[in-house]
Image (tube, helix red, strand yellow):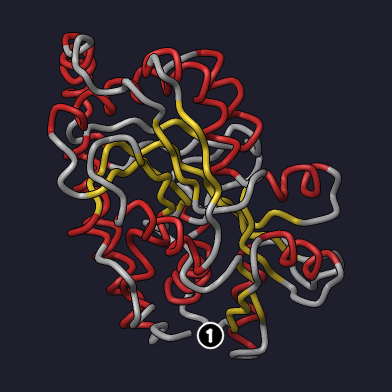
Amino acid sequence: MSAFHPTRRMLLAGIAASVATGAAMSSSAYAEQFTKIIVTFPPGGSADIFIRALEPVVAADLKSGFVIENRAGAGGNIGMQAVVQAKPDGYTLGVAPAGVLTINPHVNASMPFDPVKDLAPITLLADIPFVLVAAPGASFATLKDMIAAAAAKPGQLSVGHGGNGTVMQMTAALLSQMANVRLTLVPYRGTGPVVTDVLAGHVPLAILDIPSSLELIRTGRLTALGVTSSKRVAFLPDVPTLAEQGLAGFESTGWFGLVAPAATPGDVMTRLNAIFVKALADPDVIEKLRVIGAQPSPTTPDAFAAYIRSESAKWGRLTREMNLAGQ
């Protein structure tokens, strides 16, 4: 699977200390009632499956357990706003997708909250690489041929993605920029409709996540042109990265992390970080996460905060360069 981003590796050495500190705080009054974790997408999605896989291990350490509340809508903003408005006591947390924390602020002029000021990062949870696929019967079977086709007819080659304000949109835009071709980006409401249209040939290209595309690629119904992570992924070992096919430095993955309302006490944040970092290292949890193509990516709160800043700067720059705001 994809390697950790350098920013994420920066403070991983502090995780062991964080776990030890959290264990030492077992007598804290925190976790005497149920903790609510808000997932910003409907049941059955990657983030929902992920947090439910963690539930047995995390609930054991929280003593009182936790409940999951799915609040979908507005690209994740509705669920995250509920976290922002919650009492900062550690009993309401949120599973935040990359788009909410690093993209929406750049493309949405009416953000209801400031992700940096109003949320406190606990830990990055997981990376999920994407794959660039071609429709059945497409006139190209390699990234090189696709780029040549796009260059020959600027703007006529379309690439479907999972929606504006998502990392999939940014991945498609980054592809267009780094390949120096003009692709037409076509937004959909989630990956399901994208899969339907690319299979039908209504769009010749699509940026998909691994779970929604794996079986279709394995059975030859879709052609994988490259994965978007910096390293090849274990589920598709024969599919090269976009970077190794000439787009040097190309790296874009979906991810989500755990956040709390700003002003949540430091000792509670430390304990939560320790609990979730421990759960992400559990062998049974890791095996369950393989089915959604997710790579557990635990960090310290500071490392997660630094990664959010880095990703926000990256996508903000691309948004301005590609004039994506408001699209």
Residue 251 in sight? no
Query: Could you say which is closer to the camera, residue 301 or residue 94?
Result: 94
CA neighbours of label 1 inside 10 A, class few (<14), some (14 to 19), many (20+): some
* Image spot of residue 101 (x, y percent): 33, 58
Which residue is at a point 65% across and 72% down the rendered structure image? Answer: 188
Toward which corner of the image does residue 183 lie, by quadrant?
bottom right
Q: Amino acid at mark 1?
A: Arg
* Image spot of residue 92 (x, y percent): 35, 41
* Image spot of residue 73 (x, y percent): 54, 64
* Image spot of residue 229 (x, y percent): 47, 48
Secondary structure at badge 1 equals: loop
Which residue is at a point 43% across and 45% down the rendered structure image? Answer: 95
Which residue is at a point 81% across and 77% down the rendered structure image? Answer: 202
Query: Could you say which is closer to the camera, residue 210 or residue 226?
Result: 210
Toward which corner of the image does residue 170 lie, by quadrant?
bottom left
Q: Is residue 49 above or below residue 226?
A: above
Q: Is residue 299 above or below residue 16?
A: below
Toward which corner of the image does residue 156 lie, by quadrant?
bottom right
Which residue is at a point 38% across and 78% down the rendered structure image? Answer: 107
Q: Is residue 128 above or below residue 183?
A: above
**In the picture provided, is 83 more to the left or to the right than 22?**
right
Residue 132 in sight? yes
**In the picture provided, is 81 more to the left or to the right than 228?**
left
Pointer 1: what residue?
Answer: 182
**In the picture provided, is 128 more to the left or to the right than 32?**
right
